[in-house]
Protein backbone atom coordinates (compact mmCIF):
# COMPACT_ATOMS: atom_id res chain seq x y z
CA UNK A 1 0.00 0.00 0.00
CA UNK A 2 3.03 2.29 0.22
CA UNK A 3 2.72 2.70 -3.55
CA UNK A 4 -0.47 4.71 -3.00
CA UNK A 5 1.41 7.02 -0.62
CA UNK A 6 4.04 7.90 -3.23
CA UNK A 7 3.11 11.52 -3.84
CA UNK A 8 5.36 12.21 -6.88
CA UNK A 9 4.04 9.10 -8.63
CA UNK A 10 0.38 9.77 -7.86
CA UNK A 11 0.52 13.44 -8.86
CA UNK A 12 2.37 12.58 -12.11
CA UNK A 13 -0.25 9.99 -13.07
CA UNK A 14 -3.02 12.45 -12.21
CA UNK A 15 -1.28 15.13 -14.32
CA UNK A 16 -1.28 12.77 -17.33
CA UNK A 17 -4.98 12.04 -16.94
CA UNK A 18 -5.83 15.70 -16.36
CA UNK A 19 -3.77 16.97 -19.32
CA UNK A 20 -5.22 14.34 -21.66
CA UNK A 21 -8.78 15.05 -20.48
CA UNK A 22 -8.52 18.82 -20.78
CA UNK A 23 -7.40 18.56 -24.42
CA UNK A 24 -11.00 17.95 -25.52
CA UNK A 25 -12.54 21.15 -24.10
CA UNK A 26 -9.50 23.23 -25.09
CA UNK A 27 -9.76 21.95 -28.67
CA UNK A 28 -13.51 22.61 -28.68
CA UNK A 29 -13.05 26.18 -27.43
CA UNK A 30 -10.34 26.83 -30.03
CA UNK A 31 -12.01 25.20 -33.05
CA UNK A 32 -15.67 24.57 -32.14
CA UNK A 33 -15.00 20.93 -33.07
CA UNK A 34 -15.79 18.20 -30.50
CA UNK A 35 -13.15 15.46 -30.74
CA UNK A 36 -13.32 13.09 -27.72
CA UNK A 37 -10.62 10.91 -29.30
CA UNK A 38 -8.04 13.55 -28.33
CA UNK A 39 -8.07 12.00 -24.84
CA UNK A 40 -6.15 9.05 -26.31
CA UNK A 41 -3.95 10.91 -28.80
CA UNK A 42 -0.42 12.28 -28.78
CA UNK A 43 0.35 15.95 -29.24
CA UNK A 44 -2.00 18.84 -28.54
CA UNK A 45 -2.52 21.35 -25.74
CA UNK A 46 -1.33 20.82 -23.03
CA UNK A 47 1.48 18.30 -23.30
CA UNK A 48 0.71 15.41 -20.94
CA UNK A 49 4.36 14.32 -21.08
CA UNK A 50 5.40 17.75 -19.85
CA UNK A 51 2.66 17.80 -17.23
CA UNK A 52 3.77 14.41 -15.90
CA UNK A 53 7.49 15.15 -15.68
CA UNK A 54 6.89 18.61 -14.20
CA UNK A 55 4.53 17.12 -11.63
CA UNK A 56 6.92 14.34 -10.62
CA UNK A 57 9.85 16.78 -10.41
CA UNK A 58 7.80 19.22 -8.35
CA UNK A 59 6.66 16.37 -6.08
CA UNK A 60 10.25 15.20 -5.60
CA UNK A 61 11.31 18.80 -4.89
CA UNK A 62 8.58 19.20 -2.29
CA UNK A 63 9.35 15.91 -0.54
CA UNK A 64 13.16 15.82 -0.79
CA UNK A 65 14.11 19.45 -1.34
CA UNK A 66 15.47 21.15 -4.41
CA UNK A 67 19.05 20.63 -3.22
CA UNK A 68 18.68 16.82 -3.23
CA UNK A 69 20.33 14.57 -5.77
CA UNK A 70 17.03 12.91 -6.66
CA UNK A 71 15.56 16.32 -7.51
CA UNK A 72 18.54 17.04 -9.77
CA UNK A 73 18.08 13.73 -11.61
CA UNK A 74 14.35 14.30 -11.97
CA UNK A 75 14.86 17.87 -13.17
CA UNK A 76 17.40 16.89 -15.83
CA UNK A 77 15.21 14.07 -17.14
CA UNK A 78 12.25 16.46 -17.24
CA UNK A 79 14.23 18.96 -19.28
CA UNK A 80 15.32 16.24 -21.71
CA UNK A 81 11.75 14.97 -22.14
CA UNK A 82 10.36 18.47 -22.66
CA UNK A 83 13.11 19.31 -25.15
CA UNK A 84 12.43 16.07 -27.01
CA UNK A 85 8.70 16.86 -27.16
CA UNK A 86 9.37 20.13 -28.98
CA UNK A 87 12.31 18.91 -31.02
CA UNK A 88 12.61 15.36 -32.29
CA UNK A 89 8.98 14.33 -31.89
CA UNK A 90 7.71 17.55 -33.46
CA UNK A 91 10.08 17.17 -36.42
CA UNK A 92 8.94 13.56 -36.89
CA UNK A 93 5.39 14.91 -37.15
CA UNK A 94 6.47 17.51 -39.72
CA UNK A 95 8.18 14.77 -41.75
CA UNK A 96 5.02 12.66 -41.56
CA UNK A 97 3.06 15.55 -43.14
CA UNK A 98 5.50 15.72 -46.07
CA UNK A 99 5.55 11.94 -46.49
CA UNK A 100 1.75 11.81 -46.48
CA UNK A 101 1.69 14.47 -49.21
CA UNK A 102 4.18 12.43 -51.26
CA UNK A 103 2.08 9.27 -50.83
CA UNK A 104 -1.06 11.14 -51.92
CA UNK A 105 0.75 12.55 -54.96
CA UNK A 106 2.06 9.11 -55.85
CA UNK A 107 -1.40 7.61 -55.43
CA UNK A 108 -2.80 10.29 -57.74
CA UNK A 109 -0.23 9.26 -60.32
CA UNK A 110 -1.18 5.59 -59.89
CA UNK A 111 -4.86 6.54 -60.32
CA UNK A 112 -4.01 7.94 -63.71
CA UNK A 113 -2.05 4.85 -64.70
CA UNK A 114 -4.18 2.08 -63.21
CA UNK A 115 -7.71 1.58 -62.09
CA UNK A 116 -6.82 2.30 -58.44
CA UNK A 117 -10.38 3.11 -57.42
CA UNK A 118 -11.48 -0.51 -57.90
CA UNK A 119 -9.00 -1.85 -55.32
CA UNK A 120 -10.20 -2.90 -51.89
CA UNK A 121 -9.54 -0.62 -48.90
CA UNK A 122 -7.08 -3.09 -47.30
CA UNK A 123 -4.87 -2.81 -50.36
CA UNK A 124 -4.35 0.92 -49.78
CA UNK A 125 -1.70 2.27 -47.43
CA UNK A 126 -2.45 4.00 -44.12
CA UNK A 127 -1.29 7.53 -43.51
CA UNK A 128 1.47 8.18 -41.00
CA UNK A 129 0.49 9.88 -37.77
CA UNK A 130 1.30 13.57 -38.08
CA UNK A 131 0.50 14.85 -34.59
CA UNK A 132 3.48 13.43 -32.69
CA UNK A 133 5.17 16.28 -30.92
CA UNK A 134 4.35 19.61 -29.34
CA UNK A 135 4.75 23.26 -30.04
CA UNK A 136 6.80 25.03 -27.37
CA UNK A 137 3.67 26.70 -25.95
CA UNK A 138 2.04 23.28 -25.47
CA UNK A 139 5.10 22.03 -23.57
CA UNK A 140 5.15 25.22 -21.47
CA UNK A 141 1.51 24.83 -20.45
CA UNK A 142 1.99 21.10 -19.88
CA UNK A 143 4.85 21.86 -17.49
CA UNK A 144 2.84 24.61 -15.80
CA UNK A 145 -0.08 22.18 -15.42
CA UNK A 146 2.12 19.58 -13.74
CA UNK A 147 3.72 22.06 -11.34
CA UNK A 148 0.35 23.58 -10.42
CA UNK A 149 -1.29 20.19 -9.84
CA UNK A 150 1.61 19.02 -7.66
CA UNK A 151 1.51 22.17 -5.54
CA UNK A 152 -2.28 21.96 -5.15
CA UNK A 153 -2.36 18.23 -4.43
CA UNK A 154 0.52 18.02 -1.92
CA UNK A 155 -1.54 19.23 1.08
CA UNK A 156 -3.87 16.25 0.47
CA UNK A 157 -0.95 13.88 1.15
CA UNK A 158 0.30 15.51 4.36
Image (cartoon, helix red, strand yellow):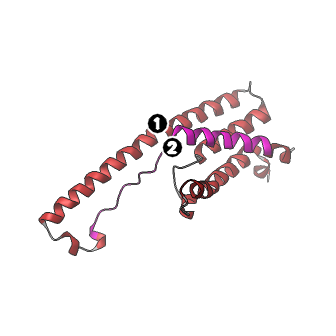
Above or below 121: residue 61: above
Q: Residue drawn 63% across and 57% down?
A: 21
Residue that carries the numbered disc 1 in the rendered image? 87
* Residue 105 horizontal/vertical position (percent): 23, 55
Give the position of the N terminus as an image quadrant: bottom right
Residue furthest to the left in view is: 113
x and y percentages locating residue 70 in the rendered image: 69, 31
Q: Residue at x 75, y 50 (%)?
A: 3
Magenta-highlighted residues: 123-152
Left or right of 114? Residue 29 is right
Q: How far apart are marks 1 and 2 (CA)?
A: 8 Å
Mark 2 is surrounded, within 10 Å at the Cα level, by few (under 14), some (14 to 19) or many (20 or more) other residues, namely many
- Pick whichever, 119 or 65, lies toward us: 119
Tell me, for residue 63, which label it has, or none. Answer: none
User: Which type of secondary structure does the marked residue at label 2 adopt?
Assistant: loop
Q: Residue 58 falls in which quadrant of the image?
A: top right
Crowding around mark 1 (Cα neighbors within 10 Å: few <14, some 14 to 19, many 20+) is: some
Q: Which secondary structure type mostly characterizes the magenta part of the structure?
A: helix
Contact flag, marks 1 and 2 (Cβ < 8 Å): no
**Which residue does the image show at 73% across and 27% down from the upper left?**
68
Q: Which residue reaches farthest top? A: 67
Upstream in the sequence, badge 1 or badge 2? Answer: 1
Q: Is residue 130 left or right of residue 148?
A: left
Q: Which residue is at 64% across, 54% downward?
A: 22
Q: Which of 53 and 101 is in front in this view?
A: 101
Q: Quadrant of residue 72?
A: top right
**138 magenta-colored:** yes
Residue 10 % position (x, y): 73, 49
Give the vertical position of 104 relative to 139 (above or below): below
From the viewer's perspective, tell me whether residue 73 is left or right of residue 2. left
Q: Is residue 110 shown in magenta?
A: no
Q: Name the residue under label 2.
A: 134
Amino acid sequence: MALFENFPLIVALFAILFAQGVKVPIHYIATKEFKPGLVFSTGGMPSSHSAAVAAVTTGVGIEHGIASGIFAVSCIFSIIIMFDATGIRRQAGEQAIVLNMLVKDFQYFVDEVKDWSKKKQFEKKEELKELLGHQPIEVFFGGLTGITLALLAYPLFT
